[in-house]
Image (cartoon, rainbow, N blue to C red):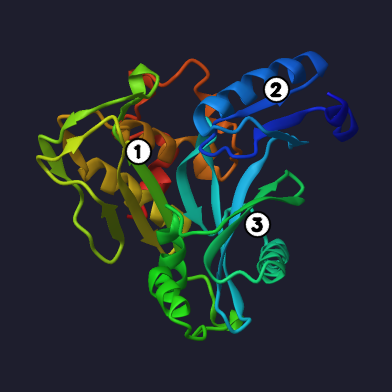
Amino acid sequence: VEIANKLGYPVMLKATAGGGGKGMRVAYNDAECREGFERASNEARSGFGDDRMFAEKFIEEPRHIEIQVIADSHGNVVYLNERECSLQRRHQKVIEEAPSPFLDEATRKAMGEQAVALSNAVQYQSAGTVEFIVDAQRNFYVLEMNTRLQVEHPVTELITGYDLVELMIRVADGDELPISQSDVGINGWAIESRVYAEDPFRNFLPSIGRLVYYRPPQDDQHVRVDTGVFEGGEVSMYYDPMIAKLITHGDTREEAIARMLSALDRFLIRGVTSNISFLSSLMVHPRFVSGDMNTNMIGEEYPDGFHPADVPHEDPSVFISVAASM
C-alpha cells in the first residue's frame, strides 16, 4: 500500500514469477490494493511456487506493442520493427499484427532504439522481444523482455522477409548477423489469429477431444498456417489449447483483414469447439477495423461474454469496403 501510494493509483500488482495473465490485479485505492495483493500472491504461490509481488503504475487505455530484436555475439543488434498485440482476453493475446496501426515513424524508431539499448546493456544474443505499454499520447514504457522466439513471430517474418528461426540458428552458431538496421523495411501488412480449442459461447471454456475433421485453409503467398495438430489427433487438457496460428499478408491492412476473414471462413474444425467465430467477429469489429484498440477492448465490447448474436452476418456493412479489396 505504501509503494502504491508513492506510485499513485491506479497500480498493477504482478507476480514476479508470473506469466500468461496469472497473478495480476489492478488496484484503484488502498482497499483494492490490500485485497488484490492477497489474491494475486495466493494465485502466484499456487501457480508458480513463488508469491513475490511487485507494483507498477497502471496505464489507462494502454496498447501492448512489442519490438522484435535479433543480436549476435559480435556486438550487432538489429530491431525488426514492431508488433501490435493489444487485442487480448484476460491478458492473453488473441490477435497480433505488424506493423502497428498506431505508431508513427518517430515513435517506432525511438522504441526500436530503446530495445536495442536494453539488449546491449545485458549483452543479449539470439532473437528476443522487448514488450512495451504505450499510452494514448504514444508515451511508451518497458514492460518486460521475452528472451525467446514468440508465438507471433510470423507477422514480423512476413513484413520484413527475414526468417527469424534461421537468424537464431546462425547467431547461435557464432555467425555475424547478415543484416544491418538499414536493411530492415516494412513490406505490406500481416495479421495473426490464434485458433484455440475453446468454446467462445460458454465463457471460452476449454474444449478437449479428438479432431474428427481438421481442414485449415491452404497455404499460399498470402496465407500461412503454423500448427502442430492433425486430423485424428487429440486435444488434451494437459497442454495449451492452441490449435494453430493463422497468418495473412496483404499490401495494405485492409487487404490483410479481408484475407484473414476469407481464411477463417475456410478453416474447418470438427470434434472440438474452436474460437473461429469469435476471431471473425473481431476482424469486422468497427474498433479493430479503424485501429482504435487497447488491451481492454474485448472486455469493453463484450462485457457479458460472446454470444451467437455477436457472430457477423455474411454481409455486415462494417467491412464491405474491406472485403471489396479481396
Q: Determine crowd level at label 3: few under 14, some 14-19, many 20+ residues with C-alpha closer than 10 A.
A: some
Residue type pointed to by label 3: Leu
- Distance of label 3 from label 1 (alpha carbons): 31 Å
Residue plotted at (70% across, 69% down) = 113
Residue type pointed to by label 1: Asp
Q: Determine crowd level at label 1: few under 14, some 14-19, many 20+ residues with C-alpha closer than 10 A.
A: few
Side of 291 relative to 16 (left or right): left
Residue bearing mark 1: 240
- Distance of label 1 from label 2 (alpha carbons): 27 Å
- Mark 3 or mark 1: whose residue is earlier in sequence: 3
Q: Determine crowd level at label 2: few under 14, some 14-19, many 20+ residues with C-alpha closer than 10 A.
A: many
User: Which of these two is toward me, 71 or 270?
Assistant: 71
Q: Nearer the viewer, mark 3 or mark 1?
A: 1
Q: Quadrant of the N terminus?
A: top right
Tell me whether circle 2 and circle 3 mark residues in contact (CB < 8 Å).
no
Mark drawn on residue 250: none
User: Which of these two is toward me, 275 or 150?
Assistant: 150
Side of 172 relative to 293 (left or right): left
Residue bearing mark 3: 103
The image position of residue 299, as x and y in percent, is: 54, 25
Q: Is residue 184 above or below residue 104?
A: below
Residue type pointed to by label 2: Phe
